[in-house]
Image: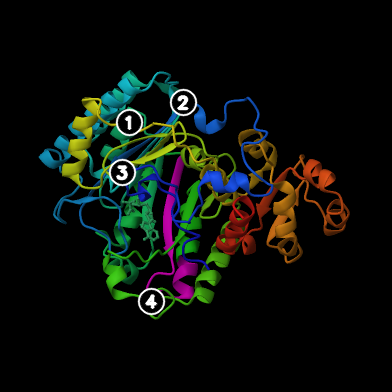
């Protein structure tokens, strides 16, 4: 139930070098879908350019270096060795990679016609805070000169405790980094050890202190729930200390046990020392309750923020807007095409050479599968508290699917997992729905949004999203 739902939404998660759908759900080809009975996609789509066809104004930049690999992590990273600290200033592995990355950015620019200035840049990892600021400066300079960077652009960086001090953070802020995402994961020494983290609790507190003393206004904290041997008391303590640290944003991920990781070889989801699904759901509910009490808005399945501090960059993913991606294993979404770069450094080097030689196309659009696209939109938007905007869906895909979706979700509305909203975002009552459901046209016209409830609907999101897929592709 819980496992693949509350996963981090990070663009490096895709691994293949061929365009693919964001999530591993089997999807029939479009031609099948249009020969079926309604609802279909693309029958009455408006002439307006769909959002996924607009030129990107966001960029994900993958900085893959870590001191060591965490036991849960299957991201494309390069482990430098645990002796490496934030002073790894002259490490040629880092400077060579940055050189390659800059070549990729420059070569990408030659492949795109329109390029509005970037509104968001996200340095993800790995541990980007291991990269010396002078090299981060080179990447930002290249982005600025090749694509342009809005003056008020959101520039985020993932940072790990123990990899930066006030001087380094100050320098990064001077370069334009204005949002920090601090990978804390847990506040208990034993859990950090189990995870194979390269830092302890003391460094977590130091890092929080540094972020505060440098005056970073917009910062996020990452936590992982359902870790091995994690008790309810530990989780409660982590949430309490998080709230006390006053980040403007919190990401809470339920542990994903990935196949080729140390955790994958040691543990089976749902079995001791991992918590049961029921226990994981309790952790999720507790986070939702405690963070709401501290005035955080639960604006996405795994994301909480104070008013106005939603992560703008991640929002581009959830509203199906295009984005560039640069670096090892990163995945871009341009012109309706998802494209993942190679995960191995040697293959990535070849990719950059090929890109420079005009031999690869990361944005070819001749086989856009509208059904896959519609499914991605449904899945991504149902992860957010805004929900699925049926008007935009109709404009982009030619069918609102409202009538069928509402009918399929009716029992879940009654059980409190799904809410139907009108165009002014007022929640439609069960009695009102009872009348609307008698008349398909009224249903289609009156329902503006469908959203999952917090926390029960979010907890059931896998099942609910699968039901929606059944409607799109019967
Ligand atoms: C790109 S990762 C790494 C960022 C940073 N280097 C760190 O580890 O703190 C971003 C976040 O994804 C989450 N994450 C990564 N792998 C995960 C997994 N297998 N299960 C749950 N959360 C995971 C962690 O909370 C992590 O902070």
Which is nearer the N-term, disc 1 or disc 3? 3
Q: Nearer the viewer, mark 3 or mark 2?
A: 3
Left or right of 354? Residue 277 is: right
The answer to whether one can see residue 108 in this image is: yes
Q: Which mark is residue 471?
A: none
Residue beneath disc 1: 361
Q: In which quadrant of the rendered view does residue 107 lie? A: top left
Q: Which mark is residue 229?
A: 4
Residue beneath disc 2: 55
Camera-nearest residue between 69 and 107: 107
Mark 4–mark 3 contact, CB under 8 Å? no
How many residues crowd mark 2 within 10 Å: few (<14), some (14–19), many (20+)? Answer: some
Q: Secondary structure at mark 2?
A: loop
The answer to whether one can see residue 296 in this image is: no
Q: In which quadrant of the rendered view does residue 186 lie? A: bottom left
Distance CA(mark 3)–CA(mark 2): 21 Å
How many residues crowd mark 1 within 10 Å: few (<14), some (14–19), many (20+)? Answer: few
Which is nearer the N-term, disc 2 or disc 1? 2
């Amino acid at each position: 139930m819980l496992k693949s739902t509350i996963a981090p939404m990070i663009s490096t998660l895709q691994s293949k070098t061929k365009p693919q759908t964001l999530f591993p759900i089997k999807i029939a080809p479009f031609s099948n879908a249009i020969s079926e009975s309604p609802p279909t996609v693309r029958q009455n789509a408006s002439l307006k350019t769909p959002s996924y066809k607009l030129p990107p104004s966001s960029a994900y930049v993958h900085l893959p270096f870590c001191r060591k690999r965490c036991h849960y992590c299957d991201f494309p990273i390069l482990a430098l060795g645990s002796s490496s600290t934030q002073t790894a200033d002259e490490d040629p592995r880092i400077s060579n990679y940055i050189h390659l990355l800059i070549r990729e950015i420059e070569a990408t620019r030659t492949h795109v016609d329109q390029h509005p200035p970037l509104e968001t840049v996200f340095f993800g990892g790995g541990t980007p805070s291991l990269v010396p600021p002078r090299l981060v400066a080179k990447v930002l300079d290249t982005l600025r000169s090749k694509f342009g960077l809005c003056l008020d652009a959101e520039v985020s960086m993932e940072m790990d405790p123990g990899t930066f001090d006030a001087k380094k953070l100050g320098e990064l802020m001077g370069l334009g980094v204005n949002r920090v995402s601090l990978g804390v994961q847990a506040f208990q020494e034993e859990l950090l050890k189990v995870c194979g983290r390269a830092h302890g609790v003391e460094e977590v507190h130091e890092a929080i202190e540094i972020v505060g003393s440098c005056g970073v206004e917009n910062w996020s904290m990452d936590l992982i729930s359902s870790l091995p041997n994690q008790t309810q008391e530990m989780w409660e303590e982590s949430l309490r200390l998080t709230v006390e640290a006053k980040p403007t944003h919190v990401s809470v991920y339920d542990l994903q046990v990935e196949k080729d990781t140390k955790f994958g070889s040691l543990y089976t989801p749902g079995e001791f020392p991992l918590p049961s699904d029921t226990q994981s759901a309790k952790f999720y509910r507790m986070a939702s309750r405690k963070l709401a009490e501290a005035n955080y808005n639960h604006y996405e399945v795994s994301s909480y923020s104070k008013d106005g501090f939603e992560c703008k960059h991640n929002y581009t993913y959830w509203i199906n807007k295009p984005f560039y991606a640069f670096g090892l294993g990163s995945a871009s979404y341009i012109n309706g095409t998802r494209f993942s770069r190679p995960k191995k450094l040697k293959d990535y080097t070849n990719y950059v050479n090929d890109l420079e030689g005009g031999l690869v196309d990361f944005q070819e659009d001749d086989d856009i599968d509208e059904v896959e696209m519609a499914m991605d939109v449904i899945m991504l938007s149902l992860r957010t508290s805004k929900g699925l905007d049926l008007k935009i869906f109709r404009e982009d895909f030619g069918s609102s699917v409202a009538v069928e979706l509402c009918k399929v979700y009716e029992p879940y509305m009654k059980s409190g997992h799904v809410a139907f909203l009108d165009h002014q975002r007022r929640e439609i009552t069960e009695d009102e729905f009872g009348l609307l459901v008698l008349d398909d046209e009224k249903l289609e016209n009156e329902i503006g949004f469908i959203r999952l409830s917090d926390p029960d609907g979010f907890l059931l999101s896998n099942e609910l999203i699968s039901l929606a897929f059944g409607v799109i592709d019967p």
